[in-house]
Amino acid sequence: MIPDSVFGLRLRKDNRNTETYFFLEADRATMPIRRANFYRSSFYKKIVGYVASHRNDLFSEYFGFKKIRVLTVTKSDERIKSMIQVNKDPHDIRNGYKLFLFTKNKVIDIDKPEKVFKRIWIDGRGKKVSLLR
């Protein structure tokens, strides 16, 4: 897993600072969602890697990140739907992981960067959410 970018946000909530780190996946739809051969690249393989790393506290152990989210920006609603489905497939959580958030690249507006904090994201369970929840 090599994300396209990593960044963190520190927020003040209830007189405490909370930090969340984000792994950005800029999906251009050049990689298949899933392959018959697990050893070749696919979005499914990335999901499995992120989930395994999260479950085994590897982000905390190696980087000191306590709370993480994986943001995927992609081209279409259909691709998001497929990504949400593979998020549900391999895990014991049938509803999928909230760890993953998806949106379309045309929803991101460079002239309105604050929009990324709005409810433009769809979590791994298919619900609309914001980054600041």
Image: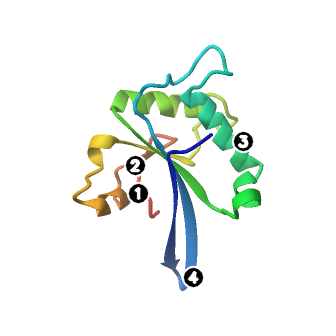
Q: Whole-Å distance between the Cαs marked 2 and 1?
A: 6 Å
* First in sequence: mark 1 vs mark 3: 3
User: Label 4 is placed on what type of residue?
Assistant: Arg
| Tag shown at residue 121 | 2
Q: Above or below — where is 115 with respect to 75?
A: below
Q: Which residue is mark 3?
A: 52
Q: Which residue is mark 4?
A: 16
User: Label 3 is placed on what type of residue?
Assistant: Ala
Q: Residues within 10 Å of mark 2 (few under 14, many from 20)?
A: many
Q: Which residue is mark 1?
A: 130
Marks 2, 3: nearer the viewer: 3
At a point 56% along the width and 64% down the height, the residue shown is 20
Q: Residues within 10 Å of mark 1 (few under 14, many from 20)?
A: some
At a point 30% along the width and 60% down the height, the residue shown is 113
Secondary structure of residue under mark 2: strand
Q: Residues within 10 Å of mark 4 (few under 14, many from 20)?
A: few
Secondary structure of residue under mark 4: strand
Q: Whole-Å distance between the Cαs marked 2 and 4?
A: 25 Å
Q: Is residue 126 left or right of residue 76?
A: right
Q: Above or below — where is 86 with respect to 129?
A: above
Choose top left, top right, bottom left or bottom right for residue 88.
Answer: top right
Choose top left, top right, bottom left or bottom right for residue 110.
Answer: bottom left
Residue 78 coordinates in the image, percent (x, y) = 37, 27
At a point 40% along the width and 49% down the height, the residue shown is 121
Q: How is the image coloured?
A: rainbow
